[in-house]
Image (cartoon, helix red, strand yellow):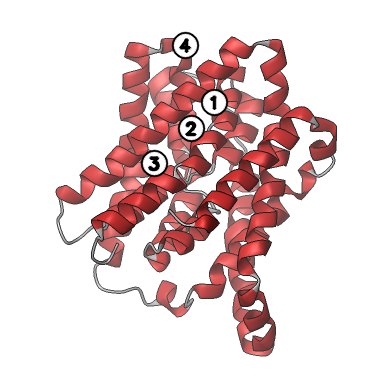
Amino acid sequence: MRMRDLILVLATLGGMLLGGFIPETADRFKDWTPYLLMGLLFISFLRLDLSALVRPQPGSWLEVMVWFLAKLVILPIAVWALFRWLWPEWALAALVLSAVSTGVSCPFYATLLGANLPRVVLVVVTTSLALPLTLPALIRLLTGTETEVPFWPMFRLLSLLIFLPAAAMALCRRWVPSLVEALGRFSYPLSLTLMFVISAIVFAPIGQHFQADPGNFLEAVALSVVLCGVYLAVGLWLPKLLPGRLTPLTGMVCLIYINNVLGVVFAARFLDFNSVLLCGCYLFPTYVALLPLRYLRERLAWVGA
């Protein structure tokens, strides 16, 4: 564990506390969320050679497609079946959380942990662009629930979140490389600030539920931890089926750091409150997972992870 990891965990949990106990403050900035996420992704691109996305390394697309299928198809169906058996009242919520795309904040964690950044970004791009099709289809197929999801608005939002920061970084590297160099020196404190504010904004409407129904809130937190453990286990297990083709750290990062913020927005508009609550409470294990991931990365010393 590094001191920076601990500082990040404490800062993001601090943002959640701010959002929960002073929701009116965080709520003022809720419309900024997409721009803050784009800023975080822009900073993550500081260490990425964008040409690696156009000309990926041999074997990259195999790994990308494996994590794509695991993230959007296999894992959601397996989690839904497990929850239908053990916690049926949370089955829909677990399906939504498990079926959302790899998050746009994932490259930040990939950089922090030393995962394969180009492959992580490719998983983010492919899962995000497919999400408007796969998420409603899975909900309808498994639960019979109809959702009138506007495809183009969601597709446009996800495209902007990913491609606008990439285009901005490409232009900056071409025309103002000194700015890129300067931002690189301050990338960590900038990322830390963005994560703090994003955590406060996202958790503001969720934290208020604690006072109204603490039992339901704590149950959602516990189940979110269980799901995070499942995602981690799948990321560890799948590479054993294709040794040398998949990197465990890349898989765990892609499966753990997901777009639960979009899950909150989607569930609030179309589904039940348990889905909103579980997606919001997933912030807890998301940040804390950084510590065991760092331990696994350094202790197991995976080659190419």
Look at the numbered discs 1 and 3 and tell me whether their residues touch, using CB distance below 8 Å: no
Q: Amino acid at mark 3?
A: Leu
Label 2 SS: helix
**Residue 129 locus on image (x, y percent):** 50, 52
| Residue position marked by numbered label 3 in the rendering | 72
The picture places residue 227, in percent across and down from the top left corner, at: 40, 30
Q: Amino acid at mark 1?
A: Leu
Contact (Cβ within 8 Å) of mark 2 with mark 1: yes
Determine contact: label 4, label 1, CB under 8 Å: no
- Residue picked out by circle 1: 278
Q: Earlier in the sequence, mark 2 or mark 1?
A: 2
Q: Which residue is mark 2?
A: 97
Q: Quadrant of residue 138?
A: top left
When the figure is inspected, residue 267 is found, relative to residue 41, above or below; the finding is above
Choose mark 3 or mark 2, whichever is in front: 2
Q: CA distance from mark 2 to mark 4?
A: 14 Å
Per the model, the C-alpha gap separating discs 4 and 1 is 12 Å
Q: Secondary structure at mark 4?
A: helix
121 or 286: which is nearer to us?
Answer: 286
The reply to whether residue 284 is in sight is: yes
Q: Total of numbered circles in the picture?
A: 4
Mark 3–mark 2 Cα distance, whole angstroms, equals 11 Å
Give the Cα distance between marks 2 and 1. 7 Å
- Report the mark closest to the observer, 3 or 4: 4
Residue 203 percent location from the top left of the image: 68, 34
Question: What kind of residue is marked 2?
Answer: Leu
Q: Is residue 69 left or right of residue 287?
A: left
Nearest the eye: 65 or 5: 5
Q: On the picture, is 44 further left or further right than 29? A: left
Mark linked to residue 89 = 4
